[in-house]
Amino acid sequence: MKISLRFAKALLALTEGQELNEGDFGGGNSKFLLEKFKDTGVLDYRPIGHQRKKYYCTDKVKLTDQLHQQFDIPSLEAYVNYLEQESKERSDAVRATSDSKFGSFNVLEGFLIHTYEEIEGVLNGKPVPLNPVSGSFVFIHDFRNFVLPAEVTVVGVENHENFKQIARQRYLFENIQPVFVWRYQNSNSLALWLDTISNAYVHFGDFDPAGLKIYVSQFRNKIGAHRCSFLIPDTIEMLIFRHGSKKLFEKQASLVNKNELESCPELKELVHFLWRLKKGLEQEILINRMEIG
């Protein structure tokens, strides 16, 4: 049985001499845990009025022993610090819980990069040529220390097939100097990185309710509307009319907030068109059959 961060912080407060109400320990299994610690005598309470109770620690050493023996928590303070960390490592888990697999880990933080012409980035102050050979990509792990030239536009590609065959879609990006990025295992690393740089961002995703929702909720709302745009080719209405899927639209439409999408000026016309035709279109339609350049 795991001890939540809130419950652990309450126990830590008790070891420092504080007295707490039952509600201070949180919900879930907190009542069961309180009884468990009370039964062993390391916690107790005193009545306050007819219904309230104030819990306190009777023996700090015995509480520490019980946490270690029954919950694999060698140090309550280390356990609380570990749970409060945004970025966790397995070594920290061992110190805090005696278990390297406790909690969830994004083993490979970062994202993939693709280009069709060489662009030089900077990683930890050193130049990094970005020009992967055919059949490979560049993976940026230490993204917090990775920057691009100011004139480069970051293009977030949602679907892996489009990312893999980006050279066949270069006709869509003739007016910008793009670097193409793809979220590794749908992690949040890409959005975190975008928040640290000033480059313009273009989202290249599906032309359906779910695709627009991803753009708004996972990128536009996080890094700011002033830096974001959604790639909408000039031929999109014709493509949706000819190749769009009503089944795709019907599956997704009820799961998104149409009003939120319409409130984004860059999406308004596309939203009206999608809801009028009641069709959605996946971005793979834009991959040319023959590679360009």
Image (spheres, rainbow, N blue to C red):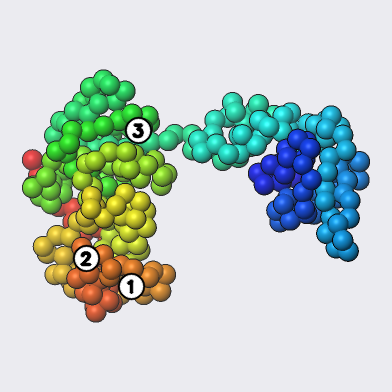
What is the C-alpha distance between the residues marked 3 and 1? 34 Å
Of badges 2 and 3, the one in the foreground is: 2
Residue with the mark numbered 3: 143
Q: Closest to the observer: 237 or 128?
A: 128
- Residue that appears at 60% across and 28% down: 92
Residue 206 falls left or right of residue 7: left
Query: Secondary structure under badge 1?
Result: helix
**Nearest to N terminus: mark 3 or mark 1:** 3
Residue with the mark numbered 1: 259
What is the C-alpha distance between the residues marked 2 and 1? 12 Å
Q: Amino acid at mark 3?
A: Phe
Residue 19 falls left or right of residue 225: right
Label 2 environment density (alpha carbons within 10 Å; few <14, some 14–19, many ≥20): few
Residue 251 falls left or right of residue 57: left
Spot occupied by residue 272 in the image (x, y as percentages of width and height): 23, 75
**Nearest to N terminus: mark 2 or mark 1:** 1
Query: Secondary structure under badge 3?
Result: helix
Can residue 69 be seen here? The reply is: no
- Residue that appears at 29% across and 52% down: 224
Spot occupied by residue 19 in the image (x, y as percentages of width and height): 79, 45
Quadrant where the C terminus sits is top left
Residue with the mark numbered 2: 265
Q: Amino acid at mark 1?
A: Asn
